[in-house]
């Protein structure tokens, strides 16, 4: 008997990743019950009807949520570092029969009753993107890669945004750093990239590349492709997950992106799209149409997820997400252990959870469609394979990483959420002296004579 014949039959759940939501699912929402398909599938209708403030959100929730949930949302928004911005498409994908547990509601609409105190080692710009910025809006941390923050708006605002220091409008909790579109700022960024021949890879983010006008997509693409050292450009957007209609109905934008991709290919340079799906229910039949359109144009699309408690922190959900991404021709690239971000401690998971889930995901599909699970270390050490810690104490929740090719000679700490620790460990974290002792012990165990960086 051959090895193939001896394999057990797959279960019925093995095809779950191919089952995409279709039909007129938006009609379940009272506000959209009479919206025609041609309108719902139009990006201009989605943008025009996007919920952009608390008043609009509360109005939209009437008829969907009981008064006590609405009050919970109102208080949650007042305590959030991110302003609210949610598309009708996202609103329609939330299960409003169980909104508290719904993974999309969790990501975009805060509930005050679920919020937890921030970790004591948190800083607003935990990844030190501004500290590693030689010119405003351009982070140069890795020797051959730069991050260009072209603008500070997005089609939606995620609660867990690691750039809550800049993205969106000011909130009661955070006064934002301005990264608005500016010809002068852009010119300085392009000049810096041109002055550094070691930079081969540029990520165009923000904010979100979806918010750039077609002419701006080409302006950025042309400037970077004309830079001799640059070999790769990545346009980063959440858009495919929250407004896939734009790819299908904004011909000018999609054509502009395609022209940049084609121009790059002709001169031997790669231009790709990096997007951001976190849960299988975000991938619908509309998504598949959009990704198929990009695939047909030769546009490479990769995905970066954030591991979040109550969203994708089980092997079953993450495996389905990874396989569903592959099904719609999106290559899973990274899964980030959640950064320390103000106001969303309830969403964070431990390094231990990431290690466990990665073991289950690996082997479930082809290696090139298996994401790398990483910690983006606080203090600017960059992305580290989640398994590659120098030391990890599961009791205190402190992990320590090295980044010898990024910032040699330094150690970088990462901290599990306090809710994942024992009661005795939480008591120690509440004491400043104990906190310092725990961090010091972890650094010493990791090889402590080197300089250490943390969020603080």
Image (cartoon, rainbow, N blue to C red):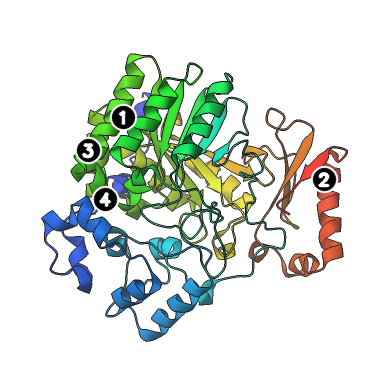
Mark 3 or mark 1, earlier in chain: 3
Give the x, y percent position of residue 396: 75, 57
- For disc 1, the marked residue is 299
User: Where the C terminus falls, by quadrant?
Assistant: bottom right
* Alpha carbon separation for disc pair 3 and 2: 52 Å
Q: For the view shown, which residue lies furthest in the front direction? A: 184
Instruction: State which mark lies toward you, 3 or 1.
Output: 3
* Alpha carbon separation for disc pair 3 and 1: 16 Å
Q: Residues within 10 Å of mark 2 (few under 14, many from 20)?
A: many
Give the x, y percent position of residue 405: 68, 27
Residue drawn at x 35%, y 72% is 57
Q: In the picture provided, is 152 more to the left or to the right than 383?
A: left
Above or below for 428 versus 415: below
Q: Residues within 10 Å of mark 3 (few under 14, many from 20)?
A: some
Instruction: State which mark lies toward you, 3 or 2.
Output: 3
Element type at marker 1? loop
Give the x, y percent position of residue 218: 33, 31
* Alpha carbon separation for disc pair 1 and 2: 44 Å
The picture quadrant where one finds residue 89 is: bottom left
Mark 4 or mark 3, earlier in chain: 3
- For disc 3, the marked residue is 252
Q: Residues within 10 Å of mark 1 (few under 14, many from 20)?
A: some
Q: In the picture provided, is 107 more to the left or to the right than 164?
A: left
- For disc 2, the marked residue is 443
Q: Are marks 4 and 3 in contact (CB under 8 Å)?
A: no
């Amino acid at each position: 008997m051959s090895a193939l014949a001896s394999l057990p039959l797959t279960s019925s759940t093995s095809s779950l990743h191919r089952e995409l939501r279709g039909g007129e699912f938006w009609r379940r929402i009272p506000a959209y019950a009479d919206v025609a398909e041609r309108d719902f599938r139009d990006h201009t209708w989605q943008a025009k009807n996007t919920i952009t403030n608390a008043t609009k959100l509360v109005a939209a929730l009437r008829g969907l949520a009981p008064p006590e949930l609405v009050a919970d949302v109102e208080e949650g928004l007042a305590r959030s570092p991110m302003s609210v911005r949610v598309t009708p498409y996202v609103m329609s994908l939330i299960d409003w029969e169980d909104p508290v547990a719904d993974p999309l509601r969790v990501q975009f609409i805060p509930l005050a009753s679920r919020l937890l105190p921030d970790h004591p080692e948190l800083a607003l710009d935990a990844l030190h993107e501004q500290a590693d910025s030689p010119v405003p809006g351009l982070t140069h941390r890795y020797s051959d890669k730069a991050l260009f923050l072209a603008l500070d708006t997005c089609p939606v605002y995620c609660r867990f945004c690691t750039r809550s220091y800049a993205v969106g409008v000011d909130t009661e909790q955070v006064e934002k750093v301005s990264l608005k579109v500016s010809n002068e700022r852009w010119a300085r960024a392009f000049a810096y990239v041109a002055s550094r021949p070691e930079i081969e890879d540029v990520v165009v983010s923000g904010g979100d590349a979806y918010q750039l006008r077609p002419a701006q997509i080409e302006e950025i693409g042309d400037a970077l492709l004309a830079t001799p050292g640059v070999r790769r450009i990545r346009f980063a957007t959440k858009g495919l997950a929250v407004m896939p209609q734009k790819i299908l109905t904004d011909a000018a934008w999609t054509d502009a992106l395609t022209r940049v991709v084609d121009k790059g290919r002709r001169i031997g340079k790669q231009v790709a799209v990096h997007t951001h799906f976190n849960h299988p229910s975000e991938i619908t039949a509309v998504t598949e149409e959009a990704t198929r359109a990009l695939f047909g144009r030769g546009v490479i699309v990769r995905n970066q997820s954030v591991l979040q408690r109550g969203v994708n922190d089980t092997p079953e959900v993450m495996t389905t997400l990874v396989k569903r991404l592959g099904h719609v021709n999106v290559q899973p690239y990274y899964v980030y252990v959640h950064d320390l971000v103000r106001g969303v401690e309830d969403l964070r998971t431990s390094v231990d959870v990431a290690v466990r889930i990665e073991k289950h995901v690996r082997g479930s599909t082809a290696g090139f469609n298996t994401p790398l699970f990483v910690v983006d270390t606080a203090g600017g050490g960059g992305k580290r394979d989640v398994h590659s810690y120098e030391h990890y104490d599961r009791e205190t929740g402190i992990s320590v990483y090295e980044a010898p090719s990024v910032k040699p000679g330094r150690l970088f700490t990462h901290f599990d959420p306090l809710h994942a620790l024992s009661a005795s460990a939480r008591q120690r974290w509440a004491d400043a002296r104990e906190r310092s002792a725990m961090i010091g012990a972890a650094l010493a165990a990791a090889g402590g004579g080197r300089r250490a960086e943390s969020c603080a």
